[in-house]
Image (tube, coloured by chain):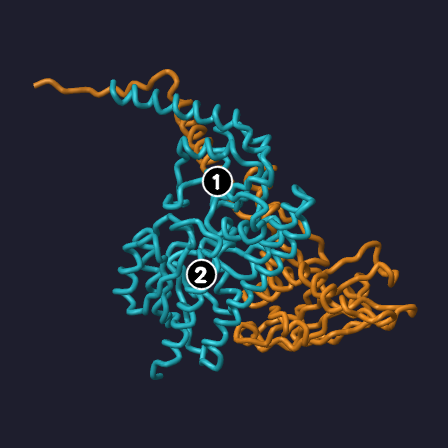
Amino acid sequence: MIRAMTAVLRKFVCMLGLLLALASGEATAQGLKIGITLHPYYSFVANIAGDQAEVIPLIDAEANPHGYTPQPDDMIRMTSMDVLVVNGIGHDAWAFEILDAAGVRDSVELIYANDGVSLIPVAGDNSGEKIVNPHTFISTTAAIQQVYLIARRLGELDPGNADLFRNNARQYALEIRRLRAEFDSQVVGADLSRFVAATMHSGYDYILQELGLQVSAVIEPRHGVEPTARQMADTIDRINLANVNVLFAEKYFASRLSDTIQEATGVEMYSISHISSGAYTAEKFVAEMRENLNTLAQAIRDVAGKPR
Amino acid sequence: MSSTTIDLVRPAGSRYEGLVLLAIALIFAGGVALYVDDSGSGELETIYEWQVSAFNSLTGADQAIYNSLYTVKDEIPYIYDDINYFNAPGEKFRWPNLQDFQDYLLPPFLQDTSWEQNGSLKWSLYEPLPEGEMQGSTMYLGTDGALPGQGSFLLVIGHVHAGFYNSNSIVVWWNEANHAEMPESGFRDSLILQGWREVVAYSGDQEVERIYGE
């Protein structure tokens, strides 16, 4: 009974919030109110728009975007947005549920950040199918493609600021490119001939491919779907056969599988950020990609430094 | 002691039970197959014979090079504006050269560790003739990659004023030959005859259409 009353009360509060948000007319205030679904998009939009727009995260900072269940507060936030930037290719399907639940599917402009990205398949999937990899935001080149597209689309929605958005996008793209230059300064001259990598999941395919570091095995090719015992045994065999010496695992979302793999194969494990946790900030993407690239450089140096 | 006789009594519709069961099994199997098929990959991508899919056909390093060129398509016009901004009156406008790309840290031209890992393609630039004469397209050729089975790349910038295209266009071509010579022109038909194929991206808008049908 109490549970039922609580549910009714929660719905009432949610509806009240929706009505208040609509009545306040926030969406028509000066400057675009730009919603985002994932942490990297917060950084992209904040750097493109500067102080000419308000950036609104759709879900709480600590919420895990993998398999996220929409909350009443999300609908309230959604009604305050003019435009929403989405990944759109599989990493934030819940955003569309929220759009529908809030009844604003037709009134909120959508920017599909990956419209201008050349997609790659998930690496290491032995099913024979080529599955689209949605992790375009853990990258440099694919990230820049998204930054340019978002800037163009925002310029169309706010023509008065189009030049500003384009110039900011260029500056930000250069900042991202400098990350690659920093990485290069750490590995220049290193012997990469023995560097053979496996990853816990497909989240790092874009950045590894951009750097010319190929992935020999992926433990969880389909993100969030744990392998069966047989698949796990096959993967361990592949890791041993390919002489894999580095395993990249997720920094924030722990998996017991990575420990199992490490114990069974003896590979060195390194943690890469999925850039999907913690406070939303303009600096977050560059800061965490810098950390990721430092980790990759460290792994390369460690392998190169080992005796043959 | 009495003997027991067993009579097998078949239901009136027994002849059809097997068929009904088979039909149900087929319907179930069909449903499962359709469900699995729905989770497939980029089936919406349709390309011409003279094109090649970056997603389906290019291998790791060539895919990485193409994706860098795909971004360069966005950036070249900006760099063009930068380098010609302070031109003196009458000074010829030019497209970025290979040194400009180094200064702008632009892959796949930037000669860093990633460039080495992706096959160390040798890049060269074909510059069109001066204004007023019959011009060709501006072309950047990347060839002689060090990786086994690696192809060659050609980035072609078509110019409206050169009479080659109806609109300014930047197109990426791929040739399965490891070594390729700089073509004499950027005409599509001519390139196709020389073994070049236009590279087509499988981009997010196609994937959104596949997933959501919008």
Which mark is nearer the camera, 2 or 1? 2
CA–CA distance between discs 2 and 1?
Answer: 26 Å
Q: Is residue B213 above or below residue A255?
A: above
**Chain B, hue in figure:** orange
- Circle number at residue A287: 2
- Circle number at residue A93: 1
Image x and y of residue B196, in percent: 72, 66
Query: What element does badge 2 sit on?
Result: helix
Chain appearing in cyan on the rendered image:
A
Amino acid marked by disc 2: Ala
Q: Is residue A256 toward the left or the right of residue A107 in the image?
A: left
Q: Chain of mark 2?
A: A
Q: Nearer the viewer, residue A127 or A24?
A: A24
Q: Is residue A242 toward the left or the right of residue B158 in the image?
A: left
Image x and y of residue B110, in percent: 60, 73
Q: Which one is earlier in the sequence, the residue at label 2 or at label 1?
A: 1
